[in-house]
Image: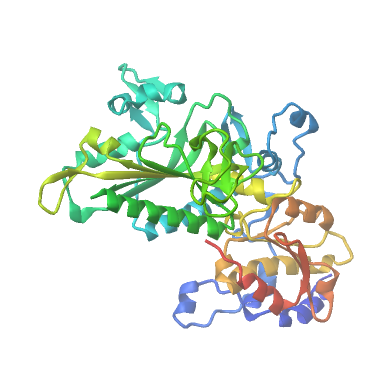
């Protein structure tokens, strides 16, 4: 076997890029112009602690069926919930609450980084506010009673009342007011956070689409005037649209009711989907769109162009924006000194994105009934490499699979940490291909018979398009070089 492996390496490795055969262990030395030392091939034949192995991931090694009985009882009420539980991405804890397993956390962290980029691009500053909110603040805004049973309420040992924050308008405005009067030169001020939120949903369902505990990005803005506040409002809406465009999600921005948040203007960012709980009216002739709750019942003509007909569809709300005016800043005395050096009340806006809801909604609309398909930027891992089955006719290239997986991250820095090796070689390659399809790795690289040819080629499956290619060493690197990561 050793002689055979030596023969194969002599034939195959000269066809691989330099980075495939001489991984650079120190990126700083490369930057300084020092040539990397060649790594003996035999020294990486053992499993590397730096290479994620499927057998070691805290995720089912064999994808499990959630069962016909569970589906019949209505426990699996939508595709994303069923696929995410089946794939070991989430695990139910209690009604409306879930464990987020490591692969899901990786995706969420990527989404958080994307949101950070877009919020900071427009001047947002990140902070973190307590989840435990004083009832006194909510009573001052008169929302303690208005929110009703939606609030999770509790008392401490001293009898003081609190709620677990579903949103933080009161808290952030009180924070700003406590700092003293601002100067107009400090505005606009755009503060945001990404934290767990809590709402006592009467009937949690649809997995992460409607839960009692969830992650949300909420931004609160403070401006010097109504005109400036509208400008900030538009800036945030544009950032939201850029975010969804980067994710490859077709979003409809619709006029919406201000509801219990309050204010003068509101828009929802809706992802069209049959499972959606919101009813939307969209004009076929112009850009008008609205949530049906903002329109008079039965209206079918477009109020904007008067010529188009409103068509109803369903959507999943993944973002919501509000222009609040002085609703909260007046109550909590959040003021600034204007150009005349006189105190004035700030104009506010608030802007939410459902982080976990975006993740689930994207899976809902992009996946097939049997397999998860991710927005490319959010996939937990970008590439899965499959060695042949142990003892098969092409078992001799098993060692090459690990070398390829390790070296891809060296050849392509953007893929460092993004390549996983399915080392479950006791299973057939067909079964592992099926698992890889269900889990939705954007690219699967399988080493089979063609990897033993004089000019080795790898079977590469693009999960998003369903296309299968047989690529030589240059083609594989060129293909994966175009993969965008965050």
Using the image as rendered, state which of residue 11 and residue 115 is in the foreground: 115
Residue 285's place in the image compared with 405, above or below, is: above
Using the image as rendered, state which of residue 109 and residue 174 is in the foreground: 174
Residue 52's place in the image compared with 87, above or below, is: below
- Image quarter for residue 299? top right
Residue at image coords 30%, 24%:
139
User: Residue lying furthest front in this view?
Assistant: 307
Residue 313 seen = yes
Residue 352 shown left or right of residue 181 in the figure: right
Residue 189 seen = no
Residue at image coords 88%, 62%:
392
The location of residue 222, given as percent across then percent down, is 28, 47
The location of residue 441, given as percent across then percent down, is 68, 57
Using the image as rendered, state which of residue 380 and residue 138 is in the foreground: 138
- Image quarter for residue 185? bottom left
The location of residue 12, given as percent across then percent down, is 76, 78
Using the image as rendered, state which of residue 380 and residue 169 is in the foreground: 169
Q: How many labels does the image show?
A: 0
The location of residue 307, given as percent across then percent down, is 56, 51
Residue 187's place in the image compared with 414, above or below, is: above
Residue 413 shown left or right of residue 185 in the figure: right
């Amino acid at each position: 076997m050793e002689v055979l492996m030596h023969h194969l390496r002599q034939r195959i490795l000269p066809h691989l890029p330099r980075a495939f055969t001489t991984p650079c262990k120190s990126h700083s030395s490369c930057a300084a112009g020092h040539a990397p030392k060649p790594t003996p091939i035999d020294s990486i034949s053992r499993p590397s602690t730096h290479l994620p192995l499927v057998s070691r991931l805290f995720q089912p090694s064999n994808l499990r069926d959630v069962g016909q009985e569970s589906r019949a009882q209505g426990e699996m009420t939508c595709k994303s919930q069923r696929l995410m539980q089946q794939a070991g991405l989430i695990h139910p804890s209690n009604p409306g609450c879930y464990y987020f397993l490591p692969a899901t956390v990786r995706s969420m962290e990527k989404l958080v980084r994307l949101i950070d980029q877009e919020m900071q691009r427009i001047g947002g500053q990140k902070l973190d506010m307590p989840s435990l909110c004083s009832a006194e603040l909510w009573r001052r805004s008169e929302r303690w009673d208005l929110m009703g049973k939606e609030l999770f309420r509790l008392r401490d040992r001293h009898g003081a009342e609190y709620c677990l924050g579903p949103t933080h308008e009161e808290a952030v405005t009180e924070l700003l007011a406590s700092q003293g009067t601002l100067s107009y030169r400090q505005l606009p001020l755009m503060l945001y956070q990404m934290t767990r939120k809590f709402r006592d949903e009467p009937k949690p369902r649809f997995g992460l689409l409607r839960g009692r505990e969830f992650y949300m990005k909420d931004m609160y803005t403070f401006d010097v005037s109504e005109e400036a506040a509208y400008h900030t409002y538009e800036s945030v809406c544009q950032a939201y649209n850029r975010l969804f465009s980067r994710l490859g999600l077709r979003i409809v921005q619709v006029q919406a009711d201000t509801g219990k948040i309050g204010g003068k203007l509101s828009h929802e960012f809706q992802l069209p989907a049959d499972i959606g709980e919101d009813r939307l009216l969209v004009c076929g002739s112009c850009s008008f769109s609205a949530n049906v709750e903002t329109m008079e019942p039965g209206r079918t003509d477009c109020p904007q162009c008067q010529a188009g007909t409103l068509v109803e569809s369903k959507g999943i709300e993944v973002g919501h924006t509000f222009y609040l005016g002085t609703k909260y800043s007046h109550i909590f005395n959040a003021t600034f000194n204007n150009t005349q050096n006189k105190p004035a009340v700030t104009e506010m806006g608030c802007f939410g994105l459902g982080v976990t809801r975006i993740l689930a909604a994207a899976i809902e609309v992009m996946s097939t009934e049997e397999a998860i398909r991710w927005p490319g930027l959010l996939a937990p891992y970008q590439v899965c490499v499959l060695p042949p089955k142990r003892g098969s006719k092409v078992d001799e290239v098993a060692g090459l699979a690990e070398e390829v997986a390790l070296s891809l991250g060296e050849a392509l820095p953007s893929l460092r940490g993004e390549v996983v090796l399915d080392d479950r070689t006791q299973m057939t390659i067909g079964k592992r291909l099926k698992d890889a399809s269900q889990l939705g790795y954007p690219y699967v690289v399988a080493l089979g018979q063609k990897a033993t040819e004089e000019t080795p080629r790898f079977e590469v499956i693009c999960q998003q398009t369903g296309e299968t290619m047989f690529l030589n060493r240059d083609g594989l690197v060129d293909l994966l070089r175009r993969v965008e990561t965050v």
